[in-house]
């Protein structure tokens, strides 16, 4: 197996186009054509993690956090990043990361954790904006069903809990084939009128190329006409954070103790427990403090995340409880997602969990 096959499996699950602008997800070190026989999965990459891979004979490390966030002007071993890069390169170890794209994708970090908490009726807390487009094409009546079904099978036409969504208008199209043309209907050099169906449907940008390819393959015309319109609708199937409901209301301290045990944290920093019971829960793995306003709009009883600054604890508007469980702790289960993706796609590929605790925060 080569690195690009592993990358394809992960990015089909969490498209690289989902990553935030500041991020550096993707293949960090190594060649896509590099042969690999096993992978080591982790949250962070340190020199100790690279050493672990060397000792286990593993030449691919898959992490949640990127080893390199910004450009390195020198690689001389002055930081833990430079030391890890030097050691990985020296031992021909490839490094790949899926960071905010794994946060944003459906069934990524946040929904994976939401299910562990036991949330139902899960929704994205801050859905992606400007990620949807409208596809419009014009098809002769005889092939409208085939083209429509090709669009749907390629992933277009999903709105909320509905699929196969389209709008169809019957009309008349005109065209005239020029020299060298081979029209599906009509004759070259003669103006032709054809009864057609205008098919409109919706599509997320990250699968647009595959949807267009499927549409063109099913379309009978030599030169199919189609339009792509950007739209401002929210894409509810991807975004930051989640919100959902517990099956039953749970007493606040009981719920906090449950969270403490689930995430294996020695303490939880939280605001005053203004709610006697918890039923609606918002969650965002990692630094999710800027989603507090979204948690308020979603009418969550509690917002679980990490990296809240002191003054942000004042911004609950007396409506929501903040629970800061720590950055590493909130994202620790990301390793399970990598494991599930790879073992399902490649049953005979060895996938190992790193035994190194890379959490830089300690508690006394």
Image (cartoon, rainbow, N blue to C red):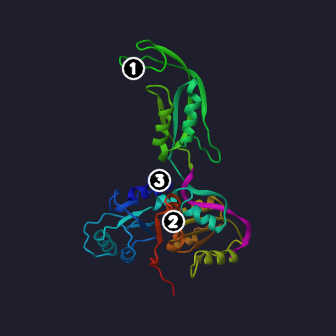
Q: Is residue 137 above or below residue 355?
A: above
Mark identifier at residue 181: 1
Quadrant containing the N terminus is: bottom left
Q: Which residue is mark 2?
A: 339
CA separation in Å, label 1 and label 2 = 52 Å
Query: Which image quadrant for residue 178?
Result: top left
Provide residue 162's location: percent of width, then percent of height: 64, 44
Report crowding for label 3: few under 14, some 14 to 19, many 20 or more residues within 10 A (C-alpha): some
Q: What residue appears at the point 31 percent right and 63 percent down from the top-left corner?
A: 71
Which of 245 and 35 lies nearest the eye of the viewer? Answer: 35
CA separation in Å, label 3 and label 1 = 38 Å
Q: What residue appears at the point 57 percent right and 31 percent down from the top-left corner?
A: 146
Which of 2 and 141 lies nearest the eye of the viewer? Answer: 2
Report crowding for label 1: few under 14, some 14 to 19, many 20 or more residues within 10 A (C-alpha): few
Provide residue 207's location: percent of width, then percent of height: 49, 45
Q: Which residues are magenta?
A: 236-252
Q: Residue furthest front?
A: 348
Secondary structure of the residue carrying numbered label 1: loop
In magenta stretch: residue 246: yes
Query: Which image quadrant for residue 195?
Result: top right
Query: Which image quadrant for residue 117?
Result: bottom right
Q: Which residue is mark 3?
A: 15
């Amino acid at each position: 197996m080569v690195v690009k096959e592993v990358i394809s499996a992960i990015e089909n699950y969490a498209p690289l186009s989902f990553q935030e602008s500041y991020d550096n997800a993707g293949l960090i070190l190594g060649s896509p054509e590099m042969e690999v026989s096993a992978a080591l999965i982790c949250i962070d990459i340190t020199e100790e993690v690279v050493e672990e891979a060397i000792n286990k004979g593993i030449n691919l490390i898959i992490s949640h956090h990127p080893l390199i966030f910004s450009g390195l002007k020198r690689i001389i071993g002055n930081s833990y990043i430079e030391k890890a890069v030097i050691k990985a390169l020296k031992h021909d170890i490839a490094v790949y990361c899926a960071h905010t794209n794994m946060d944003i994708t459906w069934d990524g970090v946040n929904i994976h954790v939401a299910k562990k908490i036991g949330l139902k009726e899960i929704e994205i807390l801050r859905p992606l904006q400007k990620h949807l487009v409208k596809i419009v094409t014009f098809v002769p009546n005889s092939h409208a069903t085939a083209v429509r079904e090709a669009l749907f099978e390629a992933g277009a036409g999903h709105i909320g809990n509905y699929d196969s969504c389209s709008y169809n208008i019957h009309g008349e199209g005109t065209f005239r084939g020029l020299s060298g043309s081979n029209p599906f209907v009509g004759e070259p050099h003669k103006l032709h009128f054809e009864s057609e169906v205008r098919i409109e449907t919706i599509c997320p940008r990250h699968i647009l190329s595959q949807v267009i390819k499927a549409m063109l393959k099913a379309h009978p015309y030599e030169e199919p006409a189609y339009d792509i319109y950007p739209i401002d609708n929210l894409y509810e199937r991807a975004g930051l954070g989640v919100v959902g409901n517990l099956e039953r209301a749970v007493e606040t301290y009981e719920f906090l103790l449950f969270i403490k045990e689930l995430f294996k944290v020695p303490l939880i920093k939280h605001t005053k427990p203004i709610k006697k019971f918890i039923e609606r829960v918002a969650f965002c793995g990692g630094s999710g403090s800027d989603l507090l306003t979204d948690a308020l709009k979603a009418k969550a009883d509690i917002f679980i995340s990490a990296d809240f600054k002191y003054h942000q604890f004042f911004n609950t508007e007396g409506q929501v409880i903040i629970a800061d469980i720590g950055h590493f702790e909130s994202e620790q289960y990301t390793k399970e997602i990598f494991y599930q993706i790879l073992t399902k796609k490649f049953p005979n590929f060895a996938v190992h969990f790193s035994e190194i605790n890379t959490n830089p925060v300690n508690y006394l």
